[in-house]
Each structure stands twice: as C-alpha cells, then as structure tokens.
Amino acid sequence: MATNLFRNLPSVNELLESPPLKGMVAKVSHHVVVTRVRSFLDDLRSELQSAAAEVKLPDVRELAERIAARIMETDKPLLRPVINATGVLLHTGLGRAPLAEAALGEMAAVAQDYASVELDLVSGHRSQRVLAVEGLLSEATGAEAAAVFNNNAAATMLSLAALATGREVIVSRGQLIEIGGSYRLPEVMTVSGAVLREVGTTNKTRLEDYEQAIGDRTAALLLVHPSNYVVSGFVKSVPLADLVRLGRAKGLPVIHDVGSGALIDFARFGFSDEPVVSESVKQGADLVLFSGDKLLGGPQCGIAVGKRSLVEQLLRHPLARALRVDKLTLAALAATLRLYRDPEQAMQAVPLLHLLSTPLENLRLRAQRLAPQMADCRAIASADPLEDITYLGGGSLPTQKLATWCVALTPAEMSVDRLATRLRTGRPAVVGRVHENRLYLDLRTVFPRQDLDLVAAVRALADGEAL
Ligand SMILES: *Cc1c(COP(=O)(O)O)cnc(C)c1O
C-alpha cells in the first residue's frame, strides 16, 4: 500500500537540516522555509494517498532540493523588469513609458521618508497635493489650473460626473472610442451619470449637428481625439476652435480628451496629427484631459488642465478622493515635467523621447554588432540584422510607421514559440515579436545599457531548460 510510505517520509526537522534548505533558511527566513516544508509534505502525503502501489520516495536531499526550488520560484516577484524588444514604445502590457532617472530619484526620496504631500512647509498649514505639479503643468500647457488622477480614464469619468451628472454631453458619433477592453466612452459616460448625446455620423459631423443638439439639458461639449484609429476617406469633423466658439456662444464648457498628452510637437519625429496639449489650451478648450504615461513619458496618471473653476469642481467631487494619486506618482510626474523646461534636455532624459529620437543608423550599427554575438549560441540557427517597421503603441498613432532595426532569430531545434517563451521566462525577461517563423528582437525599444544583457539572455538558451 502506498500509505506505508508515510512512515518513510522525512520529518520537518530532517529536511531543515539538509544542506539545500539549510542554505535557504539563511537566505529567506526560518518561518518561510518551515511553512513551505510543511505544505510540501502535506502535498506529498495526498499525492502518495492517491498514487498506485509502486511509488518510490525520493531521498531527503532530493526532496529538500525540490522544496528549495519551489521556494526560489515563489520568491521571485511576478512583477519584474523586462527588456522590451517588441519595438512597441508604449506597450500597455509592459507598463507603457519607462521613467526618467530624475523621476526615479525623486520617487525614492519621498518614498523612504515622510513628505510634504499636503503640508505647506512655509505656513505650516494644510495644502493641496496637486500643488506639487500644478505650477509645472501650467508652465508646460499654458492652463491656469490642473489636477491629477489615477489615469485618463479616471480623469474623464470624474470630469463627466462633476460637470454633467444627469445632464447631456454632446459627442460626435465618430469619436465614441474604445481604448482596449474595458474603456468604452459610452459606458464610461453611463457610469459617470452623464447622458451621452450622440451627434453626426461615423464619418461626418458638422458644427450644425452640435448646434441643433444643444438644449436645456446640455452640460458640455466633448471632443475626443481618436488616438487609436483613423477614419479616412469621406470624412469631416469639427475643429476644436469652432467647437470652442459654439461653446462660448451657448455658455457651455468644451472638454477635450486629447488622449496621449504630447507636450511637444511630435511632428519632429515624423508623426502628424497628434494634438499638443498647449495648443488645445490656447485654442480655448475649457478642460483638456490626457494620460501621464503615454507621449508625456511619465508615470501612470490622468491629467486635467484648464479653467480654474472647472478644475475646482472636479476636485470638490466625492470621487476625486477615490481617484487621487499618491506621493510617488506626484514626485515622478513633477520630475518628468521639470525636464520639459528645456526641450533638448527632455529629448535626452525622458526615455520615451530618447528612444524615439535614436537615429536609425545607431540602431543599425547595434543590430549588426549584436547579431553575430547572438548567432554564437547552439540554440540559435541564425541571427540576422534587418531593417523593419514598428509602431508607437499604447493606442497612440496606430497608422504611423517608425523605422527600426532588429535582430531576427531563427531557432536551431525548438519552435519559434518555444524560443519566445524561453526568453520571456529567462533572466532577464526578454519580450520580442514573432514574425514569419522568426523571433524579432527590435532595438528601437532596447536601451543601449541593456545590449549586453540581451546577448546574455539569448546565449543562456544553450544552457538547457530554464525553470
Ligand atoms: C489612452 C486614452 C484614454 C485612456 O487613458 P488611460 O490613461 O489609459 O486611462 C482615454 N482617451 C483617449 C483619447 C486615449 O487615447
């Protein structure tokens, strides 16, 4: 009977005395190791109970090694750094924009100590947390007031709730966007308590359409930048300036959801049609909403800038507290915004802008240098440098191509999907893109400081199966 084996199971103490676990106690903690040993033994007992008669029990050392491996595995953080070799600069699955060094410094400083989050150090009186960034946001956008929330979805939801509950918000049918999965503008509108009043058609909306829909129940006019799609051909939409004129004439606020939040003109990277926040403010939008972790290149947050009276209405709403950001986000955002005071400095120091502005020639040289180093690995049949096209991602400028260089890997024996999995689960984790039976490692999104690690990750493939 399998249950006879129970008698042969080592005791907790025997296992703890075994070298693999003795070392573990020093590394993690006694409590953690004992807990894991107990649960391992429990699992083993139930396995034995349901197993056939002929089960051979591993020796103490082997059991201890298995437990140690399990502890190591569960001790690894599930959220860990990744080398983004997908070429997608704003990859939502990979956390969008990496932060500038200055942002890391300010975050660490306020993280480890208490901080002046809501205390004015001069007067000693209570202050508002937004003051940490409001001046910088005004400087960068020209707006008189600002507020920061969890993300742009939150900023939009709160704006609608605070300015339009129970009343109508007029939106063009061409702008009823969905941003990945759960964010669909009509649904956000419903949850906010505002009533969506659609006007125009998918491809054409005119100023008269807005004008005719305005009535007693109208609370605001909403213009949404279609960040992640393009309607082309027989199209017409109303420019912001015209909508602002209409809003002024009717005494209605115009809310502009610009989405990506470009603080500088991305035309310099060859990208057209991306609204610049300051331009939107200048044209008279009463409230401009955008993300902090898209083209701005900062931490995840949603920023609302505009007329002071409207921003204060947002801040007074009960949801504002539920959607507010913490000191880490404020510190990272403030540091990132400070870099924008000198646009050339921002170009170097904001990682997103730096990656975007890396000359193609630079990527070509790196691809040609790294490819032979990666080819020198048993698991790889060939590693070829090649020029390709990538996209910004994160729902920004979906049709605008960006030139790049990649190293395309052809595996020697394993499938290309297996190769992708091995690199994803390796150390460091590397995420590439599979294309026509090869794994492309796109250097547009790899920092030069990661080049050696990238080569090492590929060469480690020869070391047999990772965990
Ligand atoms: C990305 C985007 C959002 C959502 O922003 P999050 O910061 O991801 O919540 C909303 N509106 C537009 C136009 C966007 O591009």
Image: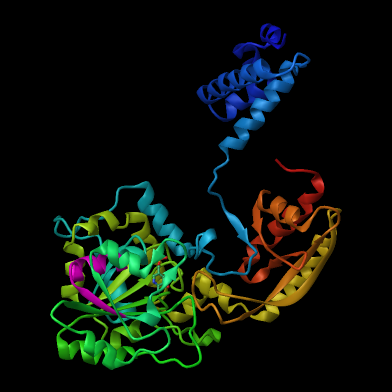
Q: Quadrant of residue 412?
A: bottom right
In the depicted structure, whether residue 272 falls above or below residue 189 = below
In the depicted structure, whether residue 198 falls above or below residue 17 = below
- Residue at image position (50%, 60%) is 95
The magenta segment is: 156-171
- Residue at image position (59%, 75%) is 391
* Residue 339 falls left or right of residue 443: left
Q: Which of 31/340 is in front? A: 31
- Residue at image position (61%, 68%) is 445
x and y, in percent, of residue 282 in the image: 29, 87
Q: Which of 70/337 is in front? A: 70
x and y, in percent, of residue 147 in the image: 26, 67
Q: Classify the position of the C terminus by image quarter.
A: top right
Q: Is residue 223 magenta?
A: no
x and y, in percent, of residue 115 in the image: 29, 52
Is residue 419 something one can see in this rendering? yes
Q: Which of 289/100 is in front? A: 289
Q: Quadrant of residue 210?
A: bottom left
Q: Is residue 169 magenta?
A: yes
Q: Classify the position of the N terminus by image quarter.
A: top right
In the depicted structure, whether residue 51 falls above or below residue 448 = above
